[in-house]
Amino acid sequence: MLYCAKCHGVCPDATAKCPNCKSGKLRQVDGEDLVLLHKADQYAAQRLGEEFDREGIVYEMKPFDGGRISYLYDSDVLPTDRMVLVRWKDYEAGKSVSARLKETLDEERSAGAEDFEEMPRKKRILVQIVSVFGFILLIMLVVYGADWAANWLRGLFA
């Protein structure tokens, strides 16, 4: 396997350029190299760090700077996302810990989703209509209030 020091990716030996960042500076991967496991949101990265500490896996978390995205946790890239890097010799152990944690996080998220109750369509439309009228009323009050305040100030100085 070849290692790209630019994006911390690993690719097959026959590769001329890194498939992630197109860098041509590839070398044989060493057991101590930190390689990209995947991208994780801030909460998942924190939980992964705790699990890696418990398992004795050497890791590093860096801010996500683009490039290859693993859709393991979330497909949206946020400024708080982290690149999870593990030592090459701990890569397989890191993948298994990550897979176990993914199942746990999926269970947590699905348990929270059970509490959510879908609003009936007619009620949702009624709420949207009332919200639109409330917003228009608020805008009208702000405009008329600003007009009244401007006229009052003009009357003071006239």
Image (cartoon, rainbow, N blue to C red):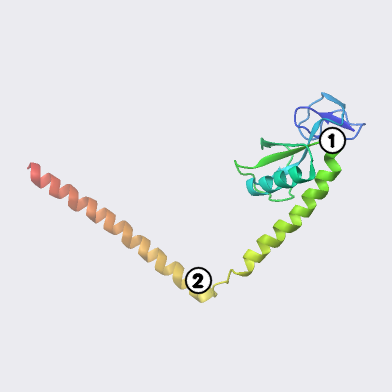
Q: What residue appears at the point 60 percent right and 42 percent down from the top-left corner?
A: 80
Q: Inspect the image, locate mark 1, and give the three-letter code of the amino acid beneath it.
A: Trp
Percent from the top left, x then y, of residue 137? 32, 62
Count how many numbered circles sit on residues in the image: 2
Q: Inspect the image, locate mark 2, and give the three-letter code of the amino acid beneath it.
A: Arg
User: In the image, is 92 to the left or to the right of 43?
Assistant: right
Q: Quadrant of the N terminus?
A: top right
Q: What residue appears at the point 45 percent right and 73 percent down from the top-left corner?
A: 126
Seen from this angle, which residue lies furthest right? 14
Does label 2 or label 1 sit earlier along the sequence? 1
Which element is circle 2 on?
Answer: helix
Nearer to us of marks 2 and 1 is: 1
User: In the image, is 152 to the left or to the right of 10?
Assistant: left
Is any part of residue 70 visible from this angle? no
Quadrant assignment, res 10: top right
Percent from the top left, x then y, of residue 29? 87, 30
